[in-house]
Amino acid sequence: MVMTKVEQGTAGKEDLDILKSLIEMNDEAPEIEPDDHVVDIGGDGAGAVRTPTKSAGYVNLRRQTDGKIVPINRNQLSMRLKEKLENGQRAWLRANEAWTGTKREGTMLCRLHPNHENYAEMQKLGLGICGNNVQPPKGNLLNANAVDRHMRVKHKDAFEAVREHEARRREDARDEAQATIAEGLREALAGRNLSSATKEKPLAVLACGLCGEEVTAKNTFGAHSRLKKHERDVHGAEVNKEQ
C-alpha cells in the first residue's frame, strides 16, 4: 500500500515515515512456529511430519502501551505502524526506540482476593483464597478479561465453579423474570375479564308499569330512555289513553 502510493506520487509525510521505518528495520524475529513438527493424524498414534509454509517473516516492534517487544508479521507492518493511540501517539515503535511511556497499573482484584467485594460468596462455594506466603494475592489486574485470564491460569477449578455458579444465578434470575411476566399477564387477563363482566352487568333496571317487562341500561338515565321507547313501541295506544 505504501509502495503503491510512492509509485503513484500520492504518498504523504506519514507514508514516507513508515517507508523509512520499513527500510531501516532490521530487527528480525524468529518464526512463531517451528520449521517441522509432528502432527497426529489418526487414533493409532501414528504421526506425520508437517513442514508449514514459510511466512513473510517477523520483525520485533515495541508496543507503546506497555513497552514490550512483540514479534509482528512483515505483512502487517504497514498497518501496525499506522495505528494510533487515543492520545495521538504511535501505537508501535521500532524495537530499538526508547520507550518513554508509563506502564499501566491495574486495580481490579482476583475474585479470590480477600478484599474482593464478592469474597464471602466465593468462600461459601469453598473456592479457597488467592495467594500464599510466597506469592501475594493478585490485586493489580487491568480489566475483567485479565481477571478471567488470571483465574483460568491460577485457579482453574475455581474458575469453572464460578462460571457454573454464575450460570445458575442467571438462570434463576431468568426463571424469576419469566414467572413475574406470567403472573402479570394472568392478572391483566383477570382484570380484563372482570372489566368485561362489569360492562355486561346492567347497572340500572326499570320495570314497565303496563306489562312488567324489565329494561336495563348502564345507568338510570339510560334505563328511563329505554323504558319510554319500550312503552311507545309496545304500548303506544295504551300510553296515549292514559295521557
Image (cartoon, helix red, strand yellow):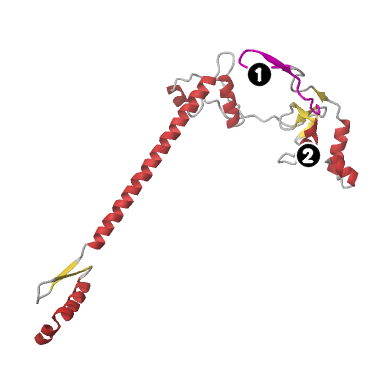
Residue pictured at 60% horizontal, 28% vertical: 146
**Residue type at the position of mark 1:** Ile
Nearer to us in this view, 43 or 95: 43
Instruction: Give x and y (percent) for residue 158.
Output: 51, 21
Q: Quadrant of the C terminus?
A: bottom left
Is 44 covered by the magenta stretch?
yes
Q: Is residue 36 above or below residue 63?
A: above
Query: Compared to 85, does 190 lie above or below?
Result: below
Closer to the observer: label 2 or label 1? 1
Per the image, label 1 sits on a secondary structure element best described as: loop
Q: Position of residue 98 (x, y in %)?
A: 80, 29
Q: How many numbered markers are drawn?
A: 2
Q: Magenta residues, as a range?
A: 37-57
Residue located beneath label 1 in the image: 41
Where is residue 195 drawn, in percent x and y?
A: 28, 58
Residue 55: where, in percent of width, then height? 79, 27
Residue positioned 75% across, 41% down in the render: 88
Residue ID for mark 2: 82
Name the chief secondary structure element in magenta: loop
Residue 138 seen anywhere in this rendered image of the structure: no
